[in-house]
Image (cartoon, rainbow, N blue to C red):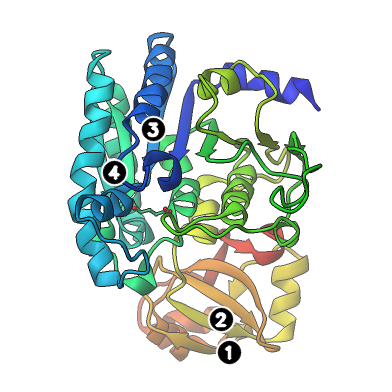
Amino acid sequence: MNTKARASLRRCKRVLVKIGSRVLTTGNGLNNRVIERICDDLSLLRDKGKEFAVVSSGAIAEGTAIMRIPDKKTALSKKQALAAIGQGSLIRAYNEAFRRYGYTTAQILVTRDDLDNRRRYLNIRNTFTSLFDLGAIPIINENDTVSVDEIQFTDNDMLSAMIIPLVEAQVMIILTDIEGIYSKDPRTNPDSTIIPEIIDLKPKDLKAYSDDANPMGRGGIKSKLQAAYRASLLGVPTVIASAYTPQVISQVLEGKEIGTYVHPRKKDMLNQKDHWMSFVSRPKGKVYIDDGAAVMVLTKGKSLLACGVEGVSGNFRPGDPVEIVQGSGETIAIGLSNFTSEEVFKIKGAGSRELSAILAYECDEEVVHRNNMILRKEIL
Ligand code: GLU
């Protein structure tokens, strides 16, 4: 194991900790012992100057326990109601646990829509900055009560990966009910061991790790690795470890070999805006381009010009993310459009000098500027 990489965790000041439903609930309600132990650990580290944002699941599981609902395959609308019931006790448990040390928590409930909109996304980032300035510990969860099916975060692992740039975390620690990523499925392979580190994780490797069924929370191992992969692109390492290990967060931040360490990318990292375009925002439309334009974009590092555009679909405004699709139907890039979808339709195929005349105003030359574009191959 690369001990230097682990040792670098000692220097991390801002840490994102994600805690899953399964460790927070017993089936009969919140597991207060686990919550208190984690908050003890966090508070003592906080005394030493570390800062934390916590992404906590458990609202639906807690609501289910409070209402004594046996069936876990509950309809979405009921889950939304159960989240509303459970979230209160969840946040109270954190409040009380941190209050013993004189620390204040702040509840942040977000929906996918809040992060999808760039202005709101940046506004949430300002709120986090203020919370850290005030010394509060943000406790984040999806606002399940108002999230509709198709726009939900896949799960809180994905939410955590999206939150990293907002809280400016230097490391993500995912606490779960297993010791880390196993080399083989431990239920059927007693000789399986914990993989201490994963270097250069790629989306195609994710399938190689078995997923586990999870009746309460939504994520599994695959989704934890997916989140770790997205963190790695930002240059942020992830440690996946067991919430039941005493002082697990202290141990991780001391650089001890505990859980699975997913290495961050060392070069070609994504900046915060590219990360948002790639993994947070949902494209609002598609711009279809010819093969010549695809070559310029893919291999020459050029912007997308109107002369290479063949078609457009969707309904978007300037600044919205759009998929750039090659004739073959393959999405080759995502970028922020300088025009509305109607305008792109009007200027498609036109030379750069004709644009202002067609649109009757002085406009940008590029449909999507290179600085606002990310190639798919850069994130795969
Ligand atoms: N937001 C859900 C809850 O608080 C959990 C989602 C997940 O487990 O990933 O119950």
Q: Which amino acid type is shown beneath numbered disc 1?
A: Gly
Mark nearer the N terminus (4 vs 2): 4
Q: CA distance from mark 1 to mark 4?
A: 61 Å
**Which dot marks residue 53?**
3
Q: Earlier in the sequence, mark 3 or mark 1?
A: 3
Q: Residues within 10 Å of mark 1 (few under 14, many from 20)?
A: some
Which quarter of the picture shows residue 23?
Answer: top left
**Residue at x 35%, y 48% (from the top left corner):** 27
Q: Amino acid at mark 4?
A: Gly
Disc 2 and disc 3: Cα gap in Å? 44 Å
The image quadrant where one finds the C terminus is bottom right
Residue highlighted by disc 2: 306
| Mark in the foreground, 3 or 1 | 3
SS at mark 2?
helix
Choose top left, top right, bottom left or bottom right for residue 64. Answer: bottom left
Disc marking residue 349: 1
Q: Is residue 134 visible?
A: no
Q: Residues within 10 Å of mark 4 (few under 14, many from 20)?
A: many
4 sits left or right of 256 in the view: right
Q: Three-letter amino acid code at disc 2?
A: Ala
Residue 247 rendering spot, x and y as whole percentages: 51, 19
Query: What residue is at 70 percent from the left and 46 percent from the top?
Result: 268
Q: N-terminal of the two: label 1 or label 4? A: 4
Left or right relative to 140: residue 306: right
Looking at the image, residue 291 lies above or below residue 122: below
Q: Disc 2 and disc 1: Cα gap in Å? A: 6 Å
| Element on which disc 4 rests | loop
Q: Select label 1 or label 4 by which is in front.
A: 4
Decide: few, some or many residues near mark 2? Use Cα within 10 Å; few <14, some 14-19, many ≥20: many
Answer whether labels 1 and 4 touch (C-beta < 8 Å): no
Give the numbered dot on residue 29.
4
